[in-house]
Amino acid sequence: MLAVVALLPGCVRTQVHAEMPALLGIDAGSRAALQKAVDTAMGRPVALAADTLTRDNTLLIEPVPAMVDGQRIDGRETRQPVRFTLLISDGDCVLVHEGGKRAQLRGAHCQPR
């Protein structure tokens, strides 16, 4: 029994990182941070609605349709939409790309979903 008591002071408390689904604030700073993170992740500018991630914590971006001479090519689309999820992680707004890449939305405000 004495050995167990002697070991207790040496125990290290591990920190648990709480993550939960989040909704983006409707302020300009939050929208700008989201726009920057999505554009960076996609490698191109992406048009986002003003209310993106304010009602749901999932964002799907459809692939750009193939075009020839300004006309959309009809046919079977094999590319899948790109999925992003918004989380609060340790108090920060974090955008998670479906592949696992994470971007902290600096200057953004989030609330639990």
Image: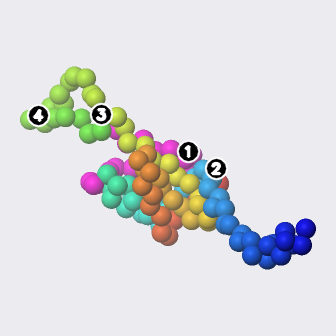
Mark-to-mark CA distance, 1 and 2: 8 Å
Q: Amino acid at mark 4?
A: Val
Q: Where is mark 1, residue-wise?
A: 56
Looking at the image, residue 8 sits to the left or right of residue 57; the answer is right
Q: Where is mark 3, residue-wise?
A: 79
Which numbered disc covers residue 113?
A: 2
- What is the crowding at mark 3: few (fewer than 14 residues within 10 Å), some, or many (at least 20)? few
Provide the secondary structure element on which disc 3 rests. loop
Q: Residue at x 56, y 44 (%)?
A: 56
The residue lying furthest to the top in this view is 75
Magenta stretch encompasses residue 45: yes
Mark-to-mark CA distance, 1 and 4: 35 Å
The residue lying furthest to the left in this view is 69
* Screen quadrant of the N terminus: bottom right
Looking at the image, residue 77 sits to the left or right of residue 88; the answer is left
Provide the secondary structure element on which disc 1 rests. loop
- Name the image quarter holding residue 62: top left
Task: Please say if the residues under marks 1 and 2 sit with CB atoms less than 8 Å apart.
Answer: yes
